Each structure stands twice: as structure tokens, then as C-alpha cells.
């Protein structure tokens, strides 16, 4: 008993920290726990209003233990708020043999004493949440050397003023409207970009067509995200919109990384080909994005109740970091190549303009990656549960600004000011290129 209880705090901390880092939309879920020995299983994390409800149905319950007698009161479900987390951890550290189901800081729902007698062994009940807060729904197994098998059906929701259930967390219920607004903005952006390309046909390159495709995929991704969240909000299930969301998300991310890499190499508007090392970057980034999309699907469509959920989160994080680092190299290579070329071709002003452009692009990309990976994560962690949508709004706003800046910098115009030769500035440009300003 003691050996298992001493492991409980570490497992508990790990599960909760993962829950803090995740922001999956809650919905109606049916799942099967099979021969599971974990002392703690996290099912949902949800922000409740004063009209919140938790519905739990368990069936086909089977408990197997190596010990002769298993106390059914040592297995059960409970809710834990963010504020009570520290108190529970202190309790368990002070008394490692304490079962979390006995903590006075949790909201106890039921334990296996409430199950109907075998062979049915079922339980079905709905609980009102009287105190508005963000809660995590856990299953605890404090029985030593015990495995549990069961079918679990959960539904967490708040009631709207008209009495209809809202299956989105209190901090996410505005996401359908938010995503709809940004999808309209991107569709308008796409129309304006097509107009720019049409009116500057002679300066339009293949990269500009890919950029138009990126805007289209981003708009479709947001439309499917809005519909996905809307159906989850109303019915608790996505009705297939989640499939479209993941498809457009994959195409959008692959196109985004591809466009950044191709712009960084100067493909189509500075040179009509890719060097071998630049091709290798694309050959690395695209397969990794396939893996990242697979991890995203597993993370979004399952939850921390599966045993490998933490591993899939780690895979997604690692792949994302690798891709973010990989897309920086072509920009750095272009800056160094332009600097070397400027020493021999006698076109100092043109090269200085190109170097300025790519250096600014480098800073913009770094800023975008830093904001969407670090700042947005920080907002999700520190924001109150009622304002979780703020991190989504910040991420989409940063993405829109990044797209606008990138598209403006590399727009198709007949005389791009970055590439205009000015004889009067030639000597000044040569002096600027001699210093180390553009070394990275």
C-alpha cells in the first residue's frame, strides 16, 4: 500500500501539469479503460458557470486485484479546482498513505460502492456544480495492485439562459464567433491579394500563387474550426467538422512552412531553382509536419485518459521546435549568400536593399514564432478560465499581422523599392556592406 501511495504525488503532479498545458475543447466522450493500473486518470478539464453539470455513466466495470479484498471506496471519481490543487498536494506529501478521495479539498462525486451489483456493475448520475470555477474530472485508484476495466461516458456542460446545454468551457464559448470573424478577414485578404496579383501580372511569380493558396487554406481552416466549435457547443460532438479542421490545418501548416522556406531561399523571384540543401530542408519539414498533424489529431480527439497522451504531446512539441528551427536556416543562408555576392558583382545598392529585406523578414519570422509558441502558451497558462479565449484571439491576431507583413514585404510590384538601384546611394551602400551589420 505504501509503495503505491508514495508514487501518487509524482503521478498526480505530472497529470495536472499536462492538464494545465492542454486546452482541448470539452465534449461528450465515450471511452474504454482497459486493464489500467494508473493511480490517477484525468478525463476532462472544464470551466463551469453557476449552471454547470457533470454527467458520468460507467458500465462493464471489472476490478482485478492481486490482494484478496479490494475496498470499493478506494476507487472513484472526483472534481478538483485549480485553487485546491496546492492544498491536495500538501496533504499527500504530509501523508503519503492518504487516498486523494479522502481529501477535504476535492469535490467527491462517487466511488465504486455506488455501483450496481455484478454482473451489470453500472452507475449513471448527473451532478450540478454549485461553485463556478474551472475543474478537472479525475478517476482515482487508491487500491494497491489493482487493475480497472470499464466503459466511461462523460458529459460536462453549462446551461444557457434558455435551458439548453453549452458543451464548451466557459472560457471557450466565444470561439465560434471569434473564428468566424477571422475567417472573414482572411477571405477579404485573399480577395485583395488576388487583385494585387492580377493588376501586377508581370511581377507575379509562382511564390505569389502559393501565398494565395496559403490564405485560402487559412480561411478554410478557420471556417471549419468555427463550425467544429459551434457543433461541439450545441451538441457535444463535432459532426465531422473536426475531420475537415484537421485536413485544412495540415494543409495550412505545410503551406505556411513551405512558403517561409521558399521566400527565405528567394525562390521564383530571385532565382528559379532550389539548391540541394534547400531541398533537404523541405524534405525534412514536410514529413515532420505529417507527424505533427498526426500527433495533433491524437491529442485533440482523445485526451489525457489514454496512456500515451503525454508522449504524443512531447512528440508534437519536439517536431514543432525542429520545424521552427529548420525554416530559419534558408533565410540565414540567403543573407550570407547576398553578402558574399555583394563583394563581387558591383551592385551594392541593390544588394543592400535585398539584405535589408531578408534581415527584416528574419526578425519578423522569429518574432512570430516566439509570440505564437511562448507568449500564447503563457497567456493560456495565466489567464483566468473565463478568459481562455484571449489566448486564441492573441494567436489569431499575431498570425494575421504576420501574414500581412510578410505579404506586404514580398508583394508583386513592378518596381519594388527594395530592389531599386539608386546611383547616388551606391557608395553609401558599399560602405554599409563592409561592416558586420548583416552577420547573424
Image: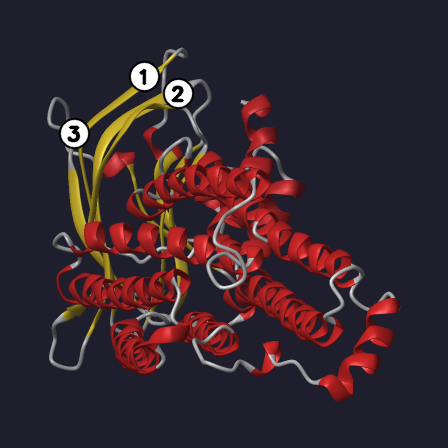
Percent coordinates x, y for residue 196 in the rendering:
34, 81
Q: Is residue 262 above or below residue 218?
A: above
Whichever of labels 2 and 3 marks the residue nearer the N terminus, that label is 3
Q: Is residue 105 left or right of residue 70?
A: right
Q: Mark 3 falls on what kind of element?
A: loop
Residue nearer the viewer, 366 or 377? 366
Colour scheme used in the picture?
secondary structure
Q: Mark 1 falls on what kind of element?
A: strand
| Residue beneath the point at 46% across and 32% down | 39
Residue nearer the viewer, 210 or 413? 413
Q: Does the CB distance between marks 1 and 2 fall below 8 Å?
A: yes
Percent coordinates x, y for residue 104 in the rendering:
49, 53
Callout 1 crowding tier (Cα within 10 Å): few <14, some 14–19, many ≥20: some
User: How far apart in space, not on screen, are marks 1 and 2 (Cα)?
Assistant: 6 Å
Callout 2 crowding tier (Cα within 10 Å): few <14, some 14–19, many ≥20: some
Whichever of labels 3 and 1 marks the residue nearer the N terminus, that label is 1
Percent coordinates x, y for residue 311 in the rendering:
48, 34
Percent coordinates x, y for residue 347 in the rendering:
72, 70
User: How far apart in space, not on screen, are marks 3 and 1 (Cα)?
Assistant: 14 Å
Residue nearer the viewer, 400 or 148? 400
- Placement of the C terminus among the 4 image quadrants: bottom right
- Residue 32 makes an appearance in the image: yes
Q: Mark 2 falls on what kind of element?
A: strand
Whichever of labels 1 and 2 marks the residue nearer the N terminus, that label is 1
| Residue beneath the point at 28% across and 51% down | 246
Q: Which mark is residue 64?
A: 1
Question: What residue is pinned by disc 2?
Answer: 146
Q: Which mark is residue 121?
A: 3
User: How far apart in space, not on screen, are marks 2 and 3 (Cα)?
Assistant: 17 Å
Q: Is residue 163 above or below residue 167?
A: below
| Residue beneath the point at 37% across and 44% down | 293
Amino acid at each position: 500500500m505504501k509503495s503505491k501511495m508514495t508514487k501518487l504525488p509524482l503521478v498526480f503532479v505530472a497529470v495536472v501539469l499536462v492538464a494545465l498545458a492542454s486546452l482541448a475543447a470539452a465534449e461528450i466522450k465515450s471511452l474504454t479503460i482497459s486493464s489500467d493500473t494508473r493511480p490517477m486518470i484525468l478525463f476532462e478539464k472544464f470551466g463551469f458557470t453557476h449552471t454547470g453539470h457533470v454527467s458520468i455513466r460507467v458500465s462493464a466495470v471489472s476490478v482485478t486485484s492481486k490482494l484478496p479484498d479490494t475496498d470499493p471506496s478506494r476507487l472513484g471519481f472526483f472534481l478538483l479546482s485549480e485553487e485546491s490543487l496546492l492544498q491536495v498536494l500538501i496533504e499527500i506529501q504530509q501523508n503519503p498513505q492518504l487516498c486523494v478521495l479522502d481529501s477535504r479539498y476535492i469535490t467527491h462525486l462517487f466511488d465504486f460502492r455506488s455501483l450496481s451489483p455484478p454482473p451489470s456493475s453500472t452507475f449513471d448520475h448527473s451532478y450540478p456544480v454549485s461553485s463556478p470555477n474551472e475543474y478537472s474530472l479525475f478517476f482515482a485508484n487508491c487500491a494497491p495492485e489493482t487493475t480497472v476495466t470499464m466503459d466511461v461516458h462523460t458529459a460536462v456542460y453549462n446551461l444557457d439562459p434558455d435551458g439548453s446545454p453549452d458543451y464548451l468551457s466557459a472560457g471557450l464559448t466565444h470561439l465560434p464567433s471569434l473564428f468566424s470573424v477571422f475567417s472573414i478577414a482572411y477571405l477579404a485578404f485573399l480577395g485583395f491579394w488576388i487583385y494585387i496579383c492580377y493588376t501586377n501580372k508581370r511581377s507575379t511569380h509562382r511564390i505569389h500563387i502559393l501565398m494565395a493558396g496559403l490564405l485560402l487554406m487559412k480561411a478554410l481552416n478557420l471556417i471549419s474550426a468555427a463550425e467544429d466549435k459551434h457543433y461541439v457547443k450545441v451538441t457535444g460532438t463535432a459532426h465531422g467538422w473536426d475531420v475537415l479542421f484537421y485536413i485544412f490545418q495540415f494543409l495550412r501548416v505545410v503551406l505556411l512552412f513551405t512558403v517561409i522556406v521558399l521566400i527565405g531561399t528567394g525562390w521564383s523571384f530571385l532565382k528559379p531553382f532550389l539548391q540541394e540543401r534547400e531541398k533537404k530542408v523541405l524534405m525534412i519539414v514536410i514529413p515532420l509536419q505529417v507527424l505533427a498533424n498526426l500527433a495533433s489529431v491524437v491529442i485533440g480527439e482523445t485526451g489525457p485518459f489514454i496512456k500515451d497522451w503525454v508522449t504524443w504531446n512531447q512528440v508534437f512539441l519536439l517536431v514543432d521546435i525542429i520545424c521552427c528551427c529548420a525554416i530559419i536556416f534558408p533565410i540565414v543562408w540567403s543573407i550570407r549568400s547576398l553578402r558574399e555576392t555583394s563583394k563581387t558583382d558591383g551592385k551594392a545598392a541593390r544588394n543592400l536593399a535585398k539584405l535589408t529585406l531578408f534581415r527584416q523578414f528574419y526578425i519578423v519570422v522569429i518574432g512570430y514564432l516566439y509570440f505564437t509558441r511562448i507568449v500564447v502558451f503563457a497567456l493560456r497558462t495565466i489567464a483566468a478560465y473565463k478568459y481562455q479565449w484571449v489566448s486564441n484571439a492573441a494567436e489569431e491576431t499575431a498570425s494575421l499581422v504576420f501574414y500581412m507583413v510578410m505579404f506586404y514585404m514580398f508583394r508583386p510590384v513592378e518596381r519594388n523599392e527594395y530592389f531599386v538601384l539608386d546611383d547616388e546611394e551606391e557608395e553609401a551602400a558599399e560602405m554599409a556592406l563592409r561592416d558586420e551589420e548583416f552577420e547573424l
